[in-house]
Amino acid sequence: MSAQSLADTSIWLVVLAASVGTFAIRLSFVALFGRLEEVPPGLERALKFVPAAVLTALVAPRLVYLDGTLALGVGNDRLLAGALAAVVAWRTESMLWTIVAGMAALWTLKWLALGL
Amino acid sequence: MSRSGSSRLSSDSRAAFRSGVRDVLPALPANVPFGVIAGVATVGAGFDPVQATAFAGMLFAGAAQVAAVELLGQNAPIAVVVLTALVVNLRYLMYSASLGAHFRDLSARWKVVVAFFLLDVTYALSVAQFEGRDRLDPAGDGRWYYLGTAIPLWAAWVGSSVVGIVFGARVPEGWHLDFAIPLLFMGLLFPALDGRPSYLAAGAAAVLAVAGFGLPFNVGILVAALGGIVAGVLAEGVGARREGAAER
């Protein structure tokens, strides 16, 4: 009971803090622009790389770790399916095709493994 | 939203709103699977349906939401979970800076509304309208166009999240639906890669994320993201110096 309520409290804390913090990020320059003529150039230079760095940091560990251990061989279905999906993502730049190709590749590999 | 303004809306404002809705419709289908997947992941990490729906509706940022719930599922400290979500959302600073210049003359109340709905799609569509040939005035009809793009997107996001939340408890393990999350990020990643410094930023982030997987407090993603940004900035600096030297 108490463990459950603690978990509930921390979930609400994360929901509120992440939402309020994100809103502050979104509001920042929209609110500042009466007092500020331009974005600091150093900040602008750094922000350009946020999408590339953040998204790669989110993707990479999910492909190379299998149940918490590093798996860089052909035995790692997710790495193979992910590599194929990366090619599709690079060629089409379409989120839908990337998901379809990656999931289809993973299901195929799992199905082949069952058949062997 | 207050209802007081709607009765006094000019026909031009209504037309601008409708044209925003029309322009955002093609972007909705791509966001539906994202919402469903995020909803499934969120209830999977132990959120109840109310918490999961509130998170989707208040945060309105899929990648950050998924990153946060995954870390929570791994019992990461709350500070790390929140910080990671905010680093993932740092890109909104860029959009805020770009749109802020256009929306300079809006009332404080409108600025709050604009900020809440600021996303890749609402930003891209609206800036195209404000900078195009038949320009909309951001302080006039332009703000209604922006709302026209934002409200359907938010409704579709929350709606598809609810589908994932309801459905999430019943997804069989064998479907490997969790694998859709990295695929989704991949679909977002490749359009963001542009030029050698951005490839270096991505490469550095990948290496750091893999190496930092076992770091205490689950700070790996945080360190990797910040390291990738630093690598990109440094690479661009080196490239610029090289060009400068070549010109001399």
Image: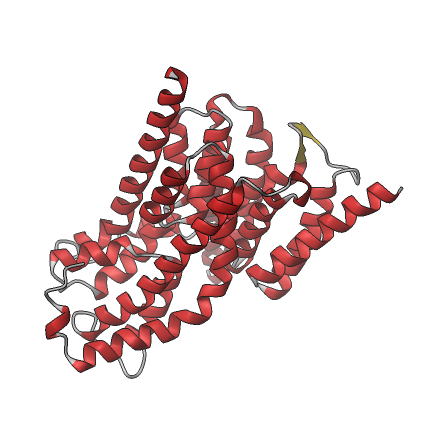
Which quadrant is the N terminus of chain B positioned in?
bottom left
Residue B67 vertical position relative to residue B211 in the rendered view, above or below? below
Residue A13 in view here: yes
Determine the residue positioned at 27% across, 53% down: B116
Residue B161, horizontal then vertical, whole percent: 44, 50
Residue B201 in view here: no
Residue B82 vertical position relative to residue B110 in the rendered view, above or below? above
Q: How many numbered marks have been drawn onto this rendered protein structure?
A: 0
Residue B139, horizontal then vertical, whole percent: 16, 69
- Name the foreground residue: A76 vs A34: A76
Determine the residue positioned at 70% across, 43% down: A79
Q: Is residue B126 left or right of residue B69?
A: left
Extreme residue toward the top, this view: A2
Q: How is the image coloured?
A: secondary structure
Q: Is residue B5 left or right of residue A11?
A: left
Residue B120, horizontal then vertical, whole percent: 39, 59
Extreme residue toward the right, this view: A116
- Name the foreground residue: B184 vs A6: A6
Q: Is residue B176 left or right of residue B94?
A: right
Residue B2 vertical position relative to residue B127 in the rendered view, above or below? above
- Name the foreground residue: A85 vs B2: B2
Determine the residue positioned at 32% across, 73% down: B20
Residue B236, horizontal then vertical, whole percent: 46, 51
Determine the residue positioned at 60% across, 37% down: A61
